[in-house]
Image: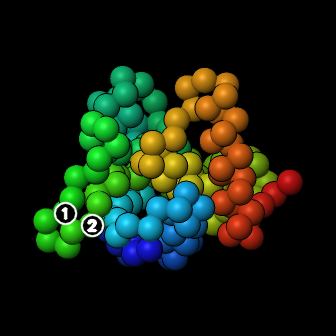
Amino acid sequence: MKLKIYFTEDSPHNPILQKACDAVLASENFTEPAEVSLTLVTDAEIRELNRQYRGFDKPTDVLSFPTEGLGGHYSINPENGFKMLGDIIISLETAERQAHEYGHGLERELAFLCVHSMLHLLGCEHESEADEKVMREKQTKVLKDMGLDIT
């Protein structure tokens, strides 16, 4: 598997985010070359995106914007032939608060948010109880595989 992540900026958190993305692809047996755009933002920035794209005028922890087209087909980047999975936007401020609230480190929280978002980019949803259960099981497995399980 080959994954290119376009980080908006250099951050000390990029290695754990790369590891989380790679772990999801491995767990989901996604072996084709792919790329993702990943941006860390403030609460104000994610609030505006949440309002603009989802109609919720409040900050959130993470937003996923899959580029999957009809029939499960992804757009292909003509420059490298990679499948363009989509965009992940994480509020670093919210991640910091949630890490404190849940009693674990920021790296674990960022990994969780990234895993959650990557699963969305691959088509996983949690609209129904059954889908929520599947998503939760996948997230738990990936975090455990990364050594970040907290049970």
Mark 1 and mark 2 lie on one chain; the one further toward the N terminus is: 1
- Say if residue 4 shows up in the picture: yes
Determine which quarter of the picture holds residue 51. top left
What residue appears at the point 28 percent right and 50 percent down from the top-left corner? 74
Position of residue 24 relative to residue 130, above or below, is below
In which quadrant is the N terminus drawn? bottom left
Q: Where's residue 127, x and y in %?
A: 55, 26
Under mark 2, the amino acid is Phe
Which class describes the residues within 10 Å of circle 2: few (<14), some (14-19), or many (20+)?
some
**How many angstroms separate mark 1 from mark 2 (CA)?**
5 Å
Nearest the camera: 18 or 2?
Answer: 2
- Residue 101 x, y percent position in the rendering: 74, 47
Where does label 1 land, which residue?
77
Colouring mode (rainbow / by chain / secondary structure / one colour): rainbow
Label total for image: 2
Q: Relative to residue 147, is residue 77 drawn left or right?
A: left
Q: Which residue is mark 2?
A: 82
Q: Residues within 10 Å of mark 1 (few under 14, many from 20)?
A: few
- Label 1 with label 2: CB-CB less than 8 Å: yes
Q: In x, y percent, where is residue 131?
A: 61, 32
Residue 47 located left or right of residue 60:
left
Query: Residue 31's image quarter?
Result: bottom left
Q: Which mark is residue 110?
A: none
Quarter of the picture holding the C terminus: bottom right
From the viewer's perspective, tell me whether residue 81 is left or right of residue 137.
Answer: left
Question: Residue furthest toward the right?
Answer: 151
Of helix, strand and loop, which one carries label 2? loop
Q: Is residue 37 visible?
A: no
